Image: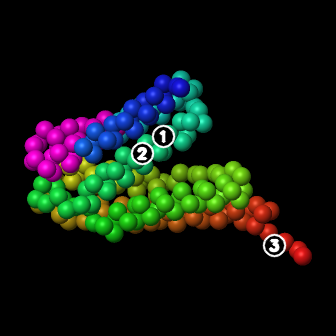
Amino acid sequence: MTTANKITILRILLIPFFVVEILYFVETGNEMNRLLAIFTFAAAAILDGVDGYVARRCHQWSELGTVLDPLADKLLLVSAIIVLSFDHAPRLAVIPLWLTGTIIGRDLLICLGVIVVRFTVGKVTVRPRLTGKIATVLQMALVLWILLKWTSGHAAWLQIICLGAGLLTGASGLLYVWDFMKQIGAHPASSPVKK
């Protein structure tokens, strides 16, 4: 268990605390809960950079880390997006359900693609693309925008962030599907069998 992996596990452990603080804020309206949720989300996002830096700097790359790191990112973002998709008016703005469906659908599509390629080809090559990275940044910005309550008077910006996150999330999902199809198509298992 490397130091980088321990930091990643800490990020995963912060997620339930983050969700509970949002739910407490929605229930009670206590601003301390909202501030703790923002702090926890920010800490988990910062620790994402820290564990990557530690892994590179201290040469602590591991097979476990390649699974845990993206899993921690996804769990944090998907948890935040699902919780903020419910109507918490008037305390918090709502993430549109079409965006939530796009994000979750893309992640499920990627999981399914990885499973199919793994069973067909044996080895999966997943290349992170710029569209996916920008989509993740926009999703994080959306969560923070809502938690910081910047929605009042800035509704147009919220819609722009939602639209950008949705388009780039969908585009990155299609690019992953394209990559998976190329990997399967290049493997002999996908060639026609002569009878």
The image shows residue 14 at horizontal and vertical percentages of: 33, 37
Classed neighbour count for the residue bearing mark 2: other residues with Cα under 10 Å, few (<14), some (14–19), many (≥20): some
In the image, taking residue 106 as reference, residue 190 lies left or right, namely right
The CA distance from mark 3 to mark 1 is 38 Å
Q: Three-letter amino acid code at disc 1?
A: Asp
Vertical relation: 104 (above or below) 10: below
Whether residues under marks 3 and 2 lie with C-beta atoms below 8 angstroms apart, the answer is no
In the image, taking residue 126 as reference, residue 122 lies left or right, namely right
Pick the residue in front: 129 or 80.
80
Whether residues under marks 1 and 2 lie with C-beta atoms below 8 angstroms apart, the answer is yes
From the image, tell me which residue sits under label 1.
69
In the image, taking residue 172 as reference, residue 122 lies left or right, namely right
Give the image quarter of residue 135: bottom left
Where disc 3 sits, the SS reads loop
Classed neighbour count for the residue bearing mark 3: other residues with Cα under 10 Å, few (<14), some (14–19), many (≥20): few
The magenta-colored residue range is 21-44
Residue 36 among those drawn in magenta: yes
The CA distance from mark 3 to mark 2 is 39 Å
From the image, tell me which residue sits under label 3.
192
Where disc 2 sits, the SS reads helix
Q: Three-letter amino acid code at disc 2?
A: Asp
Quadrant housing the C terminus = bottom right
The residue shown at (24%, 37%) is 39
The image shows residue 92 at horizontal and vertical percentages of: 16, 55
The residue shown at (13%, 50%) is 27
The image shows residue 86 at horizontal and vertical percentages of: 24, 61
Where disc 1 sits, the SS reads helix
Identity of the residue furthest to the right in this view: 195
From the image, tell me which residue sits under label 2.
73
Mark 3 / mark 1, whichever is N-terminal: 1
